[in-house]
Image (tube, rainbow, N blue to C red):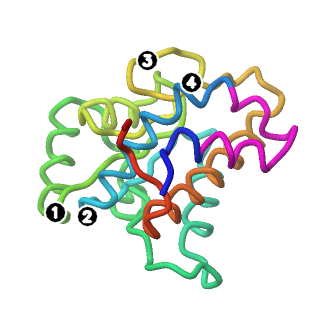
Amino acid sequence: MQQFLKWTLEEIRKDGSMMSWMEEKRFEWVPLAASMLKNLLDGHTFIVLTDDDRAWFCHYMMRAVNTQHKNRPLIPFVSLHTLFPNLHQIKTKEDIELLENLMSQIFPSGYTFFYVGKNSDIKMQIAKRKDDSFMWVLDEHLQNSFYLQTSDDNLDIKLIQLFKLLDKSIDAVLFAEVTFDSN
């Protein structure tokens, strides 16, 4: 079993020049991904939400995370839009609190928001209210989030690459190939 940071670097390098951009960003990525993966091991459900421009990515993740060819248990990833089709009606702090109450009732073992998009989207305000949310934020550096830029011509490719790295990380954690200890 190897340390998650070292394992991540090896996985990035396996993908060659296409993932070279992640070598430097791995120090930003690893603590966030490790926290997310620990929540997975603790039985949390991951509620995926994106801004409108990244709705395609939510659909991609929902299809890719639990395909039949993966030799692992099904991973509890669900789309918030699927759970709550009236998501577009959420506008106020009170609306968000009602949604949080609903999520706590549906997922008594815990849940973690997985947000991808801009900080200006109301769905980001939902995710930011939970300290353990896993967030990929565009165009703004925020604490405890992974930073990407919409001006990057390769943004869509990078989102898919990040998801593939996360998916491999899930396998590594489930099959005890990595440890989060720093010893």
Residue density around tag 4, few if under 14, some if 14–19, many if 20 or more, within 10 Å = some
**Amino acid, disc 1:** Ser
The residue beneath circle 4 is: 147
Q: Which residue is mark 3?
A: 142
**Distance between the alpha carbons at the discs numbered 4 and 1:** 29 Å
Residue 149 relative to residue 109: left or right: right
Q: Secondary structure at mark 2?
A: loop
Q: Earlier in the sequence, mark 4 or mark 2?
A: 2
* Rendering coords of residue 178 (x, y %): 47, 55
State the residue in front, 152 or 100: 152
Residue at the disc numbered 2 = 43
**Mark positioned earlier in the residue sequence (1 or 2):** 2
Any magenta on residue 18? Answer: yes
* Range drawn in magenta: 8-23
Q: Give yes or no for contact between labels 1 and 2 (Cβ–Cβ under 8 Å).
A: yes
Q: At x 75% / y 20%, what residue is drawn?
A: 151
Q: Main secondary structure of the magenta part?
A: helix
Query: What percent of the width, then of the height, locates residue 32?
Result: 43, 35
